Structure formats: C-alpha cells, structure tokens
Amino acid sequence: MSAWSVLTVSVLVVAGVVAGIIGTAGGITSLVAYPALLAVGLPPFAANVTNSVALLGSGASSAFRAREQLRDHPTTIRRWLPLTVGASTAGAVLLVVTPAHLFDRIVPFLVLAGGALLLLQPVLDRRRRRAPTGAAAPTGTGAAVPSIAGVGLYNGYFGAGAGVLMIAVLLLTGEPSLPRANAAKNVLLVAADLVPAVVFAVSGHVVWPAALALGAGAVVGGLIGPTVAGRVPHGVLRIAIAGCSVALAVYLFVTVG
C-alpha cells in the first residue's frame, strides 16, 4: 500500500475509536481493529502485527485506569507477570519466524475463536457471580501455570480474545473479584504486549501509517469509552461484533484458503 488517502486514514482513526470504546465495554478491540486494517488493504500477517503495535496505547490507558483497584492487592501481578510476558514474547517470535502463509491459513480459526470468546463472556461472568466469594483457591498449582502460559502465547501470536481468556483463567485459579481480575488482566497484557511490539517493529512488518492512525483513534476511544459504552446495550454490541467476526472468518476462508 503506497499511498495513504485522507479517507483511508479517517477509516482507521474511526475504527480505532470504536475499538477503544468496545474495549472499555468489555469487548474485544481486535475484532474491530483487525478487520479495519484488512479493509484498507493490508494482508493478514501485516494487519496482525500492525494491530498489535497500534493498540498499545489503548492497553496502556486501560492499565493506568486499573491501578487503583490493584494498589492494595499486587499479588496477582507479581505472580503472573513474568510468565505472561515470557509466553507472549515466545508467541510473537513464533509468529515472526514461521511463514506468513501459515498464519494466513490459521487466522480464520483465530478470528472465529475471538468471536466465540466474546459470546461466552457473559456466561463466564454469570458462573463467577454464582461461585462462592470466600477464600481464594491456591493459584500456583494444577492447571494455573500452563493456562496462563497458553493465554500469553496466544496473546503474542494473535491476541484477539486474550483478555477474555485471561480474566477466565484468573477467576478459575483463585482471584475472587471479577473487577479486580479485569484490572489485573489490563496490567498483565499491556506489559506482555511491550516486547512483542518491539519484535514486530524490528521485523519490519509493521505498517506505521496504519499503526499511528489506528492507535490514535484507540487512545481517544479508550478515554471516551466509559461515557459512550454506558449508553450502548452491551448485549447488542457483543452479538453484532461476534456476527462480524463470523463473516470475517468466512471471508478469510474464501480469500486465503
């Protein structure tokens, strides 16, 4: 893509704003941002790495807002930050060193997985609200370590839906508070995204004009999101985005399969 028109930049800025708002409402930002990058002409691999870099600002603002909830409860961050960062870095390296055509074939399944996770999010929330709120279960044993590592690896490789997965894993491995699990997720994933962003930048695959336009919109969306998201029915928004993810996956199956 050699020429960047005002229309193209505007589309990406608007997509970034919408993605930021959706992220604030508990949705999956990449299910808006990634299709927008495809729509303006980026191939799947370049769109993925560009999307990861572009949404750093939105993730940072979310992590900043989470600091109050985690100030008196830093245990979760200390326990899982090294593992999440290491696994996410491994996922980013895996993406860069494997052939781009392999990612092109896998990405429709990843997009479908992201949409499915978005639909399952309220189910996970309801299950957590029905669960006892007593003492937390031990978090250093059983499936906790491989689960956190798996989410980190997925986050570095593709990322759409990693936030939903991380919240689910944190809740199932002992974090008793859903809002605090969401806050911990914000901090863990933005830290985990930093090294992959450097890996992607060094690899030379990031389309910087697209990353800057999308990223600027995402920061704005993250700032205005709490006001806007409160006026939009979350169920309608969730179903609409999930439906779009299915349509996008079908499109990718047809065009790259």
Image (tube, rainbow, N blue to C red):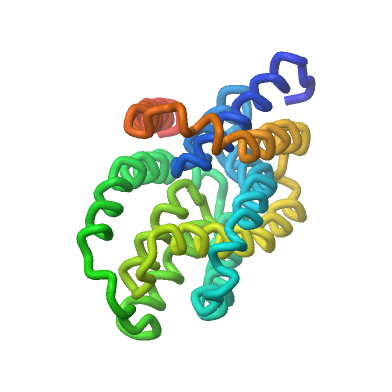
- Residue 71 vs 162, above or below: the answer is below
The reply to whether residue 97 is in sight is: no
Horizontal relation, residue 248 to residue 24: left or right: left
Nearest the eye: 98 or 186: 186
The reply to whether residue 10 is in sight is: yes
Please report the residue visible at 70 percent of the width from the left and 45 percent of the height from the top: 205
- Residue 250 at x, y percent in the picture: 35, 28
Please report the residue visible at 76 percent of the width from the left and 16 percent of the height from the top: 5
- Residue 28 vs 69, above or below: the answer is above
Horizontal relation, residue 171 to residue 36: left or right: left
Nearest the eye: 173 or 142: 173
Q: Quadrant of the C terminus?
A: top left
- Residue 226 at x, y percent in the picture: 55, 38
- Residue 219 at x, y percent in the picture: 68, 39
Question: Tag count in the figure?
Answer: 0
Q: Quadrant of residue 7?
A: top right
Q: Quadrant of the N terminus?
A: top right
Please report the residue visible at 34 percent of the width from the left and 47 percent of the height from the top: 117
- Residue 74 at x, y percent in the picture: 56, 76
Q: Quadrant of residue 146?
A: bottom left
Please report the residue visible at 62 percent of the width from the left and 54 percent of the height from the top: 65
Horizontal relation, residue 169 to residue 196: left or right: left
